[in-house]
Amino acid sequence: MPAHHDAPAATVDIDEVLELVRAHGGRVTSARRAVLSALVSADAHLTAEEVAQAVHSDHPDVHLSTVYRTLEALEQLGVVTHVHLGHGKASYHLAERVHHHAACEVCGHVIELPADLLSDVVRELKERHGFVADVHHFAFVGHCTTCLPEGHIR
């Protein structure tokens, strides 16, 4: 079951995303359309298995391995990205809006954070250490205010 999110509602047109696939040299196949449609209509980031389940309801001939290959291809095209929201499997979402994540280890609640949140850290890493960080790949893991252990300041 996908984690619930605090995020602005997405207004993504599937045809615009497919045009982006074409613009990046990708082919538009029925599997790609089905995977993108599942991601566009989702109200949360989905694991590959959740994408496959959504796809399979309308396209039973699309196998899990096809969904994995499609997600990988769409990620290489820059249309889809994945993030590790804690200790679970990777979750996928459209790459049209870059953001960070904070994930509650207890209830799975995910908060989408602004893209510029870590810009000072990224700049420091590059200036001081010559290191270019990919800070969108992992989530901040901790506890939401509902699940904070007793004794912690809210």
Image (cartoon, rainbow, N blue to C red):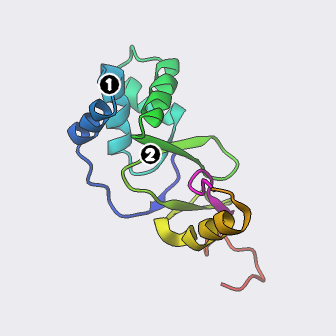
Looking at marks 2 and 1 on the same chain, the residue that comes earlier in the sequence is marked by 1
Apparent side of residue 28 relative to residue 78 in the rendered image (left or right): left
Where 35 sits versus 90, above or below?
above
Tally of numbered tags? 2
Around disc 1, counting alpha carbons within 10 Å, would you say few (fewer than 14), some (14 to 19), or many (20 or more)?
few
Q: Residue at x 61, y 65 (%)?
A: 122
Of 38 and 95, nearer the camera is: 95
Of 91 and 57, nearer the camera is: 91
Residue 85 % position (x, y): 61, 52
Q: Amino acid at mark 2?
A: His
Task: Indicate yes or no whether the magenta region holds residue 137.
Answer: yes
The quarter of the displayed image where residue 152 is located: bottom right
- Specify start and end residues of the magenta stretch as a single range: 133-141
Apparent side of residue 84 relative to residue 114 in the rendered image (left or right): right
Task: Using the image, tell me which numbered label, if any, was put on residue 58.
Answer: 1
Q: Residue at x 63, y 40 (%)?
A: 89
**CA–CA distance between discs 2 and 1?**
20 Å
Element assignment for label 2 = strand
Quarter of the C terminus within the rendering = bottom right
Residue 146 % position (x, y): 61, 73
Element assignment for label 1 = helix
Residue on which disc 2 sits: 93
